[in-house]
Amino acid sequence: MKTGRVLKIAFKGLGRNKLRTFLMMIGVVIGITALTLVVSAGMGAQDRIMERVKKFGLESMMVFAGAGREMGQPMAGQPATSLKLEDAIALKQEIRAIADIAPFNQKRQAEVKFQDKSTTTMVFGVTPSWAPVWDWDAAEGDFISDEDITGLARVCVLGPTVKRELFGTANPIGEQIRIGNVQFEIKGVMQAKGTSPAGGDMDNRIYIPLSTLMRRVTNVDYISAIKVRLTTAKDMDKTAANIQALLRERHKMTPGTPDDFTITTPTEVTKMAEKVAGTFNIFLALVAAISLISGGVVVANIMLISVNERRKEIGLRKAVGAQPKDIMLQFLYEATAVTLTGGVIGIVLGAIGAKILEAITQMPTSISWESVALGVVFSTLVGIIAGLQPARRAAALQPIEAMRA
């Protein structure tokens, strides 16, 4: 019998039993919806990881004061004091692979006032090298200069969020604000940067000369971290080892003593983020697998019931010349048509669910051809596997026995 005719008979059979078809389909719809969500969330997580790594810089690394630090995470307890400005200068002078450095310190939860308005933000003490090393400069006015550093100038550059909260749409350049008890003149506004790798607002910051922060604001002799930009990314591991050796030597650390600093490279940032995303995806994949297995079991059981209920139909078809192969193909096509249709519905619902998930949780999702292909492949496989045994049973029925049932 021609394939087209077998398909036509299969779809007629499904159409005559709409409730049964719906019950077979629902488990697959749930499973494929969950699978689409898994793939979409996984692809979105991968895209965010690469976006953050690129934003950080593939040829850059961070050196933090204190052991066991994670990029973007505040240190618990007292701030680490193991890094000095002289360490940063030594790195640039003694390690040839380093193109430039950007040492900085920060004051968290600083109160900032302008007239009757106030806000709480982070204040970064930076050097002029911050702009080229971070690829992040002033959008309006000027950034911190060498003269500001040497003169302990009380000038600042606002992040866009701080500007909006204190000045709205007005031009803030030349105005005076107070950071704590110290008055500063605004000389610029930074380019908008968005969220940090840790999810914080990178525009909710104020930048002042590093020397001014250390002498006039916090009165400390240490720095928080150093961003290091290399001449080429291929020397990353070797340069990290050289930085570690130089800092241990400068800090007079004996063999076996743990580092009092932390070096973070883009590779480590990627591994860290992928580990978190991988754990989440495994959990969702288990949910999808359980749903698909449940759906397959439902399809198989309902198809077996269908075979018993349609014994006379099967016997009649065999009596008029249908071959066992035709009967088997009919039931396989029915099972596959149900699961494939359920898969398409599941893909659509999964795509809609992914967008809703992204809107609610701010977690990025990415609908790609991989998620569509996996949905189609898995729903087809479930249909073939679930329909195989019922199809064999139907094909094995003898016409006379089937007609007597």
Image (spheres, rainbow, N blue to C red):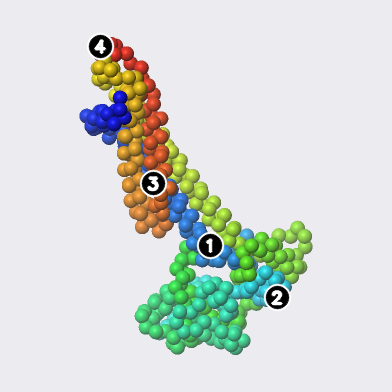
Distance of label 2 from label 3 (alpha carbons): 53 Å
Mark 3: give few (<14), some (14-19) or many (20+) Cα within 10 Å.
Answer: many
- Residue marked by disc 4: 404
Q: Which of marks 3 and 1 is nearer the N terminus?
A: 1
Give the structural element (helix, strand or loop) at label 3. helix
Q: Which amino acid does label 2 sit on?
A: Gln
Q: Earlier in the sequence, mark 2 or mark 3?
A: 2
Q: Is label 2 or label 4 in front? A: 4
- Residue marked by disc 3: 372
x 55%, y 57%: residue: 270
x 68%, y 76%: residue: 89
Tag on residue 96? none
Q: Is label 4 or label 1 in front? A: 4
**In terms of depth relative to the viewer, which is nearer, 288 or 395?**
395
**Would residue 379 appear left or right of 135 to someone viewing this image?**
left
Q: Is label 2 or label 3 in front? A: 3
Q: Which amino acid does label 4 sit on?
A: Arg
- With respect to residue 350, does 55 lie above or below? below
- With respect to residue 388, does 101 lie above or below? below
- Residue marked by disc 1: 53
Distance of label 2 from label 1 (alpha carbons): 27 Å
Q: In which quarter of the image is the N terminus?
A: top left
**Would residue 373 appear left or right of 122 to someone viewing this image?**
left
Contact check, label 2 and label 4, Cβ < 8 Å: no
- Residue marked by disc 2: 93
x 59%, y 58%: residue: 267
Image quadrant of residue 165? bottom left
Contact check, label 2 and label 3, Cβ < 8 Å: no
Residue at the farthest left position: 16
Distance of label 2 from label 4 (alpha carbons): 96 Å
- With respect to residue 311, does 151 lie above or below? below
Distance of label 4 from label 3 (alpha carbons): 46 Å
